Image: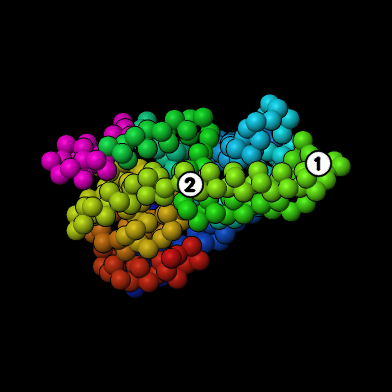
Amino acid sequence: MIDNAVHPADDQTAEALLRAELARGDAMADSVLPILQYLLAAEDSALFSDEILARVRGMVADMARQIVEQLFCDSAGPGQFAEDIEDLSRAFMADSLLLAHVHALALEWQMTERLQSRLALDPVVAPLVQAMIASAEGTVHGLAVSWLAAQARWCQAQRRMSLPLEELPGDLLHRVLLAVRGIFGAGKAPLAIRSGETGTLRDERSERLALAEAAIRRQYDEGSTRLGLASRLLTGLGGASHIALSVSHAGVALFLTALASGSGLRREAAVLATHEAQLARLALALRAAGLKAADIEKQFLAIHPEAMLPEGFERLGADVAASILASGRQGG
């Protein structure tokens, strides 16, 4: 956290403090995925019955289940393929980019629930979304209605600890499909044909893989995903996109998308920046996105009311903040 007891005399000292805090944040962020992978692989999950861990495991398993059902929908019940779901889940957990995305979704939902409880912030219909839905501009109205529906579905999915494949970013869906090929297309057959495999069965397996992958890709539209719609909504705001940098006005989802876009961070890194151990990154990201110190204080009051910006922060330019942010290992 930014130390409230430190009172730097000028902006140079504030910059040094923020650089040091960012370095500490980097060290913590670098440890997140290795620790998460270790915990997810642990045999005795009762030792780590944490909400985030359970949610990540649930989403990963749900993705694996969807793949197996797509591959073997005409076969016996899903219980027959439990081992395949476990194998595929492990492959997904080993993908650091995919795991970082799922972890970020779990953190986003945790923040969404926290702000709903503390600020009565609706997880679906934030004031900005209401204003867009009421817009006389047909394109804005249509996008807002589509996004609202997508956000409502995401909230329901998070409550079930699930993640529809069609909601993944395009590059991650591609990585998922590559992992599926690695599990089912490189010598490891599903349970139904795992022993005594003949050339005919190998051909059947390859055909199933090709058909399933083609069906998934055919049904996929990145622009219609929740995150795709969020980006399109913010793009439609044009020069007024900064209004989405108010979490109480835009809601958590659009705020995080705007924070990532404005600061140049990956969205996963922007989500992580809202963690209490990443306050320097959050302050720098908001400043790099163009917010003034007074407006950044308002966001801190909403997200981390106990934290304070270092003295002299108001003299830190947006370009300097962006430079410091980019120097961190989570930047860009």
- From this viewpoint, which residue is outermost toward the right? 196
Q: Secondary structure at mark 2?
A: helix
Is residue 297 shown above or below 142?
A: below
- From this viewpoint, which residue is outermost toward the front? 200
Is residue 281 shown above or below 48?
A: below
Magenta-span inclusion, residue 138: yes
Picture disc at residue 218: 2
Amino acid residing under circle 1: Arg
Nearer the camera: disc 1 or disc 2: 2
Seen at 30% across and 51% down, the residue is 232
Colour approach in the figure: rainbow
Seen at 37% across and 45% down, the residue is 224
Q: From the image, tell me which residue sits under label 1.
A: 194
Dot 1: within a 10 Å radius of its alpha carbon, few (fewer than 14), some, or many (20 or more) residues?
A: few
Q: Position of residue 300 (x, y in %)?
A: 33, 48
Dot 2: within a 10 Å radius of its alpha carbon, few (fewer than 14), some, or many (20 or more) residues?
A: few
Q: Position of residue 154 (x, y in %)?
A: 43, 36
Q: Which residues are magenta?
A: 119-144
Amino acid residing under circle 2: Arg
Q: Position of residue 298 (x, y in %)?
A: 27, 48
